[in-house]
Image (cartoon, helix red, strand yellow):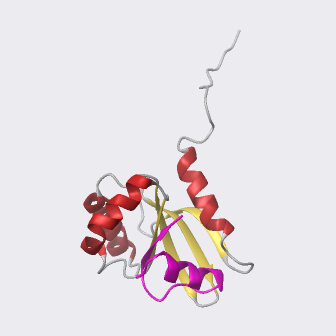
Amino acid sequence: MSARPYPEGPPIRDVAHARLLARFRAQLPPGVRFRTEVPLRQDRDQRAWDGEIQAADGTCKLEAETALRDLQATDRKIALKMADDRVERVILIVSDTRGNRRVLREHRELIRDRYALDTTAVMRAIRTGRIPERSGIAVL
């Protein structure tokens, strides 16, 4: 006799995270390539970007956060990945929740230098099939 255990529950560990990325992907026009779980270029580095978009004018990495509990830790994590992977532009995609809006309203200026563009500017570029000229935050 042989048996194998299969855990119950959803097959994706973080369904909210996957849904956030799906909302972003739905905004992309034809011709913009979208990938998830994009490994850093360094050998033996287990980290990955949550996503990447490729358009005619370039490539941009994506990080998705469903709950901004520690904005400084999130910023530091992304800054380290940017440095280690030699990335210039990142879009931080944040779930549109009351708590996240409050954190950004109260602390947005702490990360303004790294993420200069807000949702309107980021999504305007994305919807026209372009990569935003700078890093930014998109609340979706």
Quarter of the image that includes the N terminus: top right
Question: In terms of image quadrants, where is residue 107?
Answer: bottom left
Depth check: give the residue in front, 116 or 107. Answer: 107
Instruction: Reply above or below: 104 against 9.
Output: below
Instruction: Determine whether, in the image, residue 128 is placed left or right of residue 72.
Output: right
Instruction: Determine whether, in the image, residue 10 is placed left or right of residue 70.
Output: right
Residue 45 picture location, percent across and down: 40, 60
Instruction: Reply above or below: 5 against 82.
Output: above
Q: Is residue 45 visible?
A: no
Residue 132 picture location, percent across and down: 51, 85
* 111 in magenta: no
The residue range painted magenta reads 117-140
* 128 in magenta: yes
Residue 90 picture location, percent across and down: 44, 75
Q: Residue at x 51, y 79 (%)?
A: 120
Depth check: give the residue in front, 126 or 31. Answer: 126
Q: Residue at x 75, y 78 (%)?
A: 30
Depth check: give the residue in front, 87 or 2. Answer: 87
Instruction: Reply above or below: 110 against 58.
Output: above
Depth check: give the residue in front, 136 or 47. Answer: 136
